[in-house]
Image (tube, helix red, strand yellow):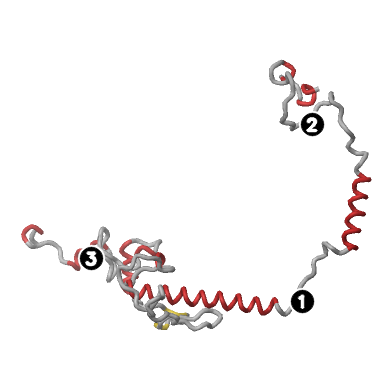
Amino acid sequence: MTAIEYGGGPTAKQRQDFCNLPQGAHIPGYMGYCPQFKFVHGLTYGIQTAKIAASEIYLKPRIGDDKISKTPKVFKDEIPRDKIPKATGENKYMDTMIPGYTGDVPHMPYKFGGTFKHLCEECVDEFVTEYQKHEKDNQNLKELSGLFPRLKPIRDDPSARDNMNLWIDDYLKKTAGKIGPRGPTEPPIPGYTGYIPQLRTTELGTANRFHEGAE
């Protein structure tokens, strides 16, 4: 075996056996792109890249039983999609959005990986569908609310007004003698934040409770 600088060195098979790498694994330190590598954890670089190389690569979204199919564009309430408006010369959102348009496109900041035209059509389709769904829900709510009788206010009902007056009078009678008027020399309750003469400027408010110092 000749030296590497003279065109010799170990073969690829010998290097693979030396690193103990399985078939399809990248050599540790490889800085190129490896699909889905940043989403997996827990294994060594060689074993993980070998598992990725052996797995099947899907180029379209999958549904349930691993069948390759397009994601159905239908909401849970079975409202059909493909609601992209046609261009009329006056509407803002339409099916032929010109690349370079810098105005607002709903949901556009959250879309990636597609052309401007396709992403705009998808965003406009979602926006119009959600708007129609919201309008339909509001209409159903109005129809349901119309089936029930309207509630009548009771603020002018004589019986309710008289009962409230009786309750207020009874409450005032029960609490009239519990809290009497306070004299001008009685100390305030703890927590009072108003002005008390000489409480802070003399030793009266030092090392005493608030009640004693204020008194």
Residue at x 32%, y 62% (from the top left corner)? 45
Report the residue marked by disc 1: 149
Q: What's the residue at 61%, 78% (across, down)?
A: 139
The disc, 2 or 1, on the residue closer to the chain's N-terminal end is: 1
Residue position for label 2: 189
Q: What is the x, y in percent for residue 144?
A: 68, 78
Q: Foreground mark, 3 or 2?
A: 2
Viewport quadrant of the C terminus: top right
Q: Amino acid at mark 3?
A: Gln
Dividing the picture into quadrants, the one containing residue 68 is: bottom left
Badges 2 and 1: C-beta atoms under 8 Å apart?
no
Dividing the picture into quadrants, the one containing residue 37 is bottom left
Q: Nearer the viewer, residue 8 or 127?
A: 127
Query: Under tag 3, what secondary structure?
Result: helix
Q: Which residue is nearer to you in this view: 139 or 3?
A: 139
Frontmost of labels 2 and 1 is 1
Q: Residue furthest left?
A: 6
Q: Up-down: is 144 above or below 174? A: below
Q: Given the image, on which type of amino acid does mark 2 rest? A: Ile
Residue at the location (29% across, 68% down)? 22
Residue found at x 69% / y 17%: 201
Give the CA distance from mark 1 to mark 3: 81 Å
Q: Nearer the viewer, residue 196 or 53?
A: 196
Q: Secondary structure at mark 2?
A: loop
Residue 28: where, in percent of width, then height? Answer: 27, 60
Label 1 sits on a secondary structure element that is loop
Return the x and y of residue 27 as percentages of the image width and height: 25, 62
Residue 35 appears in which quarter of the rendering? bottom left
